Image (cartoon, helix red, strand yellow):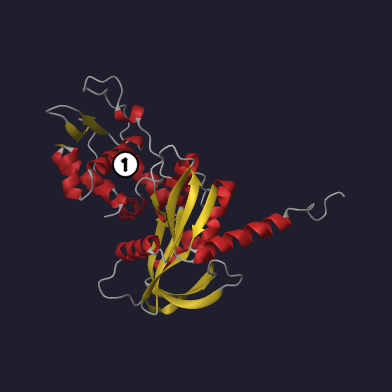
Amino acid sequence: MSRPQRLIELLATLQSRRRTTAEELARELGVSVRTVLRDVQALVSAGIPVFTERGTYGGISLLPGDQVDLGKLTTAEADVLRTVGLDVDRARQLGAETAVRSARGKLVPRRTPPAASSGLPLSLADVVTIANRAWFSAADNPAGLAKLAEDLRRGRRLRIRYRRSGQATARWSGVDPYGLLLRADRWYLIADVDRRPRMFAFSRLDTWEVLDEPRRLRSGAALSDVAEELSSALESSHRVIVTALIDADRVDIARRVLGSRLRSASVPDGDARVTITVGYQELDGVRQLLQFSDHIEVLRPRAARRLIYDLARKIGDRHSSSPPGSPA
């Protein structure tokens, strides 16, 4: 179940039950208690009258007198809430901003909610804020995304012109589309090519055509399952394992930059350098380590060490003289 779907399910549960606990919601939704609390905070931040209270008789509930009636939502409003939740920016990218703003207007009460009765002077919304965008990510507002989403809803095959990473030209191919995936602030088209799942970055999708034939999806395959399958395969595909030494004071930065590619890091014990192992799908992925410059030394495999040496030499040669067009 996606997060937007969980938010609607959470609201529906609170509407029917009036009071429950984070533990009960976690069991019913199949997520952790921490995830439930983050979802509650997302509703609170959007102005939905959800109230949390500690103690034996505490729990999570809708504020008294502020009933949220999901039955007031139109089909379009309910559809966009299940898709992007209460995120106006994402709805705008899909051409559904009007629907999500209208839905929020029906869910948010017009009067100020009463102060918390838990004995604490501040509410959860006063002390917690959540930002889901990745650090240093450029704003992703892709032109044409709303049109693609509309075309996908026709349930037809597509002919797409797509440029693969590292290639200069784009090529045409026929695909059977499942839909769109938003991950780490980037949009992807999920589709089958010759009955095999593929992920296409929207930023490299030049154009597309809707074909006059229905899409042919594999039996039992759904968008969320295929997207998870592709994501898991990408993150776990480490055919090349690189061992390197990195300065101990750069380990925390390495964890942030490398993410799941960092397979292991020895615990610093007074040593100036730490041994790390990094996984890549291809040898060329070792280029990523160049950003650590003189703080890292690749040990093995030998091909990776040689590639770093060749790349560093080319960079050095390119910077050994004045740039073209500069004054003598």
**Callout 1, which amino acid?**
Lys
Q: Position of residue 24 (x, y in %)?
A: 15, 42
User: Residue at the spot x=49%, y=78% of the render?
Assistant: 173
Local SS, label 1: helix
- Is residue 326 visible in the rendered image? The answer is yes
The front one of 190 and 238 is 238
Say which of 225 and 6 sits in front: 225
Residue 230 in the image, given as x and y percentages of width and height: 37, 65
- Left or right: 155, with 63 as reference point: right
Q: How crowded is mark 1: few (under 14 residues within 10 Å), some or many (20 or more)?
A: some
Q: Which residue lies furthest to the right in this view?
A: 328
Q: Quadrant of residue 19?
A: top left
> For the point 25% across and 46% down, which residue is it?
70
The vertical placement of 115 against 73, above or below, is above
Q: Residue at image x 46%, y 51%?
A: 258
User: Residue, x 51% and y 71% (percent of image)?
Assistant: 208
285 is higher (above) or lower (below) than 264? below
Vertical position of residue 48 compared to residue 308: above or below: above
Q: How many labels does the image show?
A: 1
Q: Mark 1 points at which residue?
A: 106
* Percent coordinates x, y for residue 313 in the rendering: 67, 58
For this rendering, which residue is in front, 274 or 203?
274
Front residue of this view, candidates 134 and 102 = 134
* Residue 157 appears left or right of 68: right
